[in-house]
Amino acid sequence: MEIDLRPLEETVTAPAPDDAGLVFIGRIRTPWTGRGQCPRQGRAGEGPLCRVEIDPLWAPALAGLGDFARLELLYWLDRARRDLVVQNPGHSGATRGTFSIRSPNRPNPIGTAEVTLEGQEGCTLLVRGLDCLDGTPLLDVKPARRQLAEIDETGTAGGPRHCVKG
Ligand code: SAM
């Protein structure tokens, strides 16, 4: 799906994507099927409960995650353009370079969000705070940075959390 260009926007002939050999570790399930429905920027703890479905292959890698109230997710914005260098956010006419905004359209369309971990059903994490389309591939899950700082200082992460284990 090619996203239409807005007035004043500029593209380059981008190198053929190689995707750096990334492995998608799961899929994110959200209520949003069109970009217009999606929040521009998720906020941890806000918005609908979303499901982060992790391939059971990675089940052992989830051990200990329930200790954290907040996680950082990295995801692949798979329906983005990868050739935009100058963008026209909101059709405002005030153009910006791609690296000065958090648009999904970028050479390597990686999205990040800090979310609250609301529960866990087996290999599915229930989270709040996302802003991606249904089916967005998942790249990585890690404890939110400030939670790690708390662990360093106190030996805890405000947890353990009470998760529903499926
Ligand atoms: N929170 C992330 C970040 O800052 O890196 C993403 C922010 S980006 C502005 C969020 C927007 O990307 C959504 O409002 C939607 O328009 C678009 N989007 C969401 N999922 C996408 C996907 N899978 N492919 C392309 N665009 C997507």
Image (cartoon, helix red, strand yellow):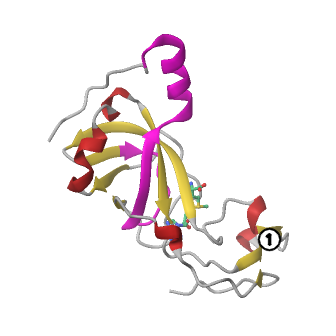
Q: Residue 10: image x %, image y %?
A: 79, 83
Callout 1 crowding tier (Cα within 10 Å): few <14, some 14–19, many ≥20: few
**Most foreground residue, 164 or 55:** 55
Displayed-image quarter of ligand 1: bottom right
Magenta stretch, residue numbers: 127-156
Q: State yes or no: residue 134 in magenta.
A: yes
Pointer 1: what residue? Answer: 92
Q: Residue 143: image x %, image y %?
A: 45, 36
Visible residue check, residue 87: no
**Left/right of residue 120 with respect to residue 80 in the rendered view:** left
Q: Residue at x 48, y 19 (%)?
A: 151
**Left/right of residue 12 with respect to residue 77 in the rendered view:** right
Q: Residue at x 78, y 84 (%)?
A: 7
**Left/right of residue 63 with respect to residue 93 in the rendered view:** left
Looking at the rendered structure, the number of numbered marks drawn on it comes to: 1
In the rendered view, tell whether residue 137 sits above or below residue 61. Answer: below
Tag 1, which secondary structure? loop
Q: Residue 93: image x %, image y %?
A: 84, 74
Q: Amino acid at mark 1?
A: Ser
Q: Residue furthest left?
A: 166
Q: Residue at x 29, y 41 (%)?
A: 62
Visible residue check, residue 105: yes
Q: Quadrant of the image for the C terminus?
A: top left
In the rendered view, tell whether residue 105 sits above or below residue 66. Answer: below
